[in-house]
């Protein structure tokens, strides 16, 4: 049996800061999809509306990861969300 090595690479992502009042609908729909994949219940409708449910889910994620609870998705929140979501 031979050992297999995994090749890795570092990737830099440029992601938008998402705010409840000024976020593109497609970005919010992707955010909702990620929360749904993580088991959000009841599931989000992936329609691109950043409303109270989105704000609450983002704030809960921020609290769970020791981040400032702003309700907006900035770099720290994206990092926490992606670290949870990508291994799936």
Image (tube, helix red, strand yellow):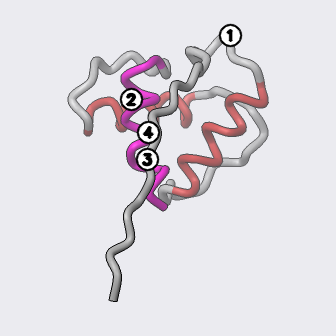
As measured in the structure, the alpha-carbon distance from the residue carrying label 4 to the one carrying label 3 is 21 Å
- Name the residue tied to disc 4: 81
Q: Main secondary structure of the magenta part?
A: helix
- Name the residue rendered at 44%, 53% in the picture: 7
Single out the residue that lies furthest toward the top: 22
Q: Quadrant of the N terminus?
A: bottom left
As measured in the structure, the alpha-carbon distance from the residue carrying label 2 to the one carrying label 3 is 32 Å
- Name the residue tied to disc 1: 22
As measured in the structure, the alpha-carbon distance from the residue carrying label 2 to the one carrying label 4 is 12 Å
Q: Above or below — where is 29 with respect to 36?
A: above
- Front-most of 10 and 83? 10
* Lateral position of residue 53 relative to residue 27, left or right: left
- Front-most of 3 and 48? 3
Q: Nearer the viewer, mark 2 or mark 3?
A: 3
Query: Who comes first in sequence, dot 1 or dot 2?
Result: 1
As measured in the structure, the alpha-carbon distance from the residue carrying label 4 to the one carrying label 1 is 20 Å
- Name the residue tied to disc 2: 59
Estimate how packed mark 1 is, as few (under 14), some (14 to 19) or many (20 or more) residues with alpha carbons within 10 Å: few
Residue range (magenta):
74-88
Query: Who comes first in sequence, dot 2 or dot 3?
Result: 3
Look at the image and say whether residue 77 sits in the magenta stretch.
yes
Query: Who comes first in sequence, dot 2 or dot 4?
Result: 2
Query: Who comes first in sequence, dot 1 or dot 3?
Result: 3
Q: Nearer the viewer, mark 1 or mark 3?
A: 3
- Name the residue rendered at 55%, 29% in the picture: 52
């Amino acid at each position: 049996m031979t050992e297999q090595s995994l090749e890795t690479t570092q990737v830099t992502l440029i992601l938008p800061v998402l705010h409840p009042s000024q976020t593109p609908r497609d970005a919010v729909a992707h955010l909702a999809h990620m929360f749904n994949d993580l088991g959000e219940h009841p599931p989000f409708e992936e329609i691109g509306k950043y409303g109270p449910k989105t704000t609450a889910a983002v704030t809960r994620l921020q609290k769970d990861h020791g981040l400032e609870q702003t309700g907006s998705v900035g770099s720290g929140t994206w990092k926490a969300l992606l670290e949870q979501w990508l291994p799936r």
